[in-house]
Amino acid sequence: TTVVVTAGVLLAAGTATVAIYNTGRPIVGIPKNWSVLSGNADQWSWADGKINAHSTTGDTILASNRKYRDVTLSVVAGTTNRDADIAFRMQDADNGYFLLYVPDNTSWAAENGCYIAVIKRVAGEETEIGTFKRPNLAESAKITLKVRGSNIEVSLNNTPVINIYDTTFGSGFVGLRAYGDPIKPCDATFAKLIIH
């Protein structure tokens, strides 16, 4: 079932309360019940129909306040200078998984090629556990992540590209991530975010 999809305003006793509805539509704006797990809130903004992230100081992770076990998350992720990432099954900023989207014509791709990768972070140490490499990955693309039990599936524009198993984290927060430094900053965008 769809758990977090879009926010609506419910008026009760003269005060505005944010309610999350199960409608299946993309999330509009930064979800009200999400917070910054790493970095600063001012690194995230909503403009032009997209959630925007900017970092020159390492990780910035915007995450749900609820843990998910099995989840499907789709988003149109994009960047012009580094990578745009999905965070999932996060325990905290130092433990969980990331799905990296590194398109062509970015500084990161110039050194490492363009690719999609699943990264496992344990106590701050990262290990790549699944990779898809292909030349000419577009500046933005629809990325779908489907996690069921220990199975992690990734699709690029509705075509499956990664299918792996890992049992390290059974549930956790989901969210979005950008990673940049002063020499190679990161500006990432996320549109049409849907979580089931």
Image: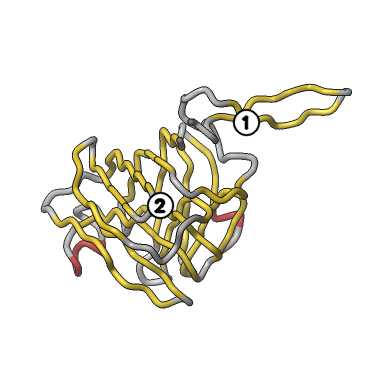
User: Crowding at label 2, few (<14), some or many (≥20) Cα neighbours within 10 Å?
Assistant: many
Placement of the C terminus among the 4 image quadrants: top left
Q: In the image shown, does 91 or 36 lie closer to the viewer?
A: 91
Q: Quadrant of residue 31?
A: top right
Please say if 47 is above or below 118: above
Tell me the number on the disc at residue 86.
2
| Mark carried by residue 196 | none
The residue under label 1 is: 20
Give x and y (percent) for residue 90.
50, 60
Residue at 48 percent across and 68 percent down: it is 95
Q: Earlier in the sequence, mark 1 or mark 2?
A: 1
Residue at x 15%, y 57% (from the top left corner): 133
Q: Residue furthest right?
A: 13
* Between marks 1 and 2 in the image, the one whose residue lies nearer the viewer: 1
Percent position (x, y) of residue 66? 60, 48
Instruction: From this view, report whether residue 22 is shown above or below residue 41.
Output: above
Query: Tag 1: Cα neighbours inside 10 Å, few (<14), some, or many (≥20)?
Result: some
Q: Is residue 120 above or below residue 194?
A: below
Residue at (19, 64) in percent of width and height: 110
**Could you tell me residue 78's position as x and y percent?**
33, 46
Q: Position of residue 47 (x, y in %)?
A: 50, 37
Pick whichever, 111 or 35, lies toward us: 35
* 118 left or right of 15 in image: left
Identify which residue, 191 or 161, lies in the foreground: 161
Colour pattern of the rendering: secondary structure
Kindly indicate the quadrant of the structure image that contains residue 29: top right
Q: Gap between marks 1 and 2, in whole Å?
A: 21 Å
The disc labelled 1 sits on which kind of residue? Ile
Amino acid, disc 2: Ile
Question: In what element is the residue under mark 2?
Answer: strand
| In this rendering, position of residue 76 left or right of residue 135 | right
Query: For the point 64% across and 43% down, which residue is it?
Result: 33
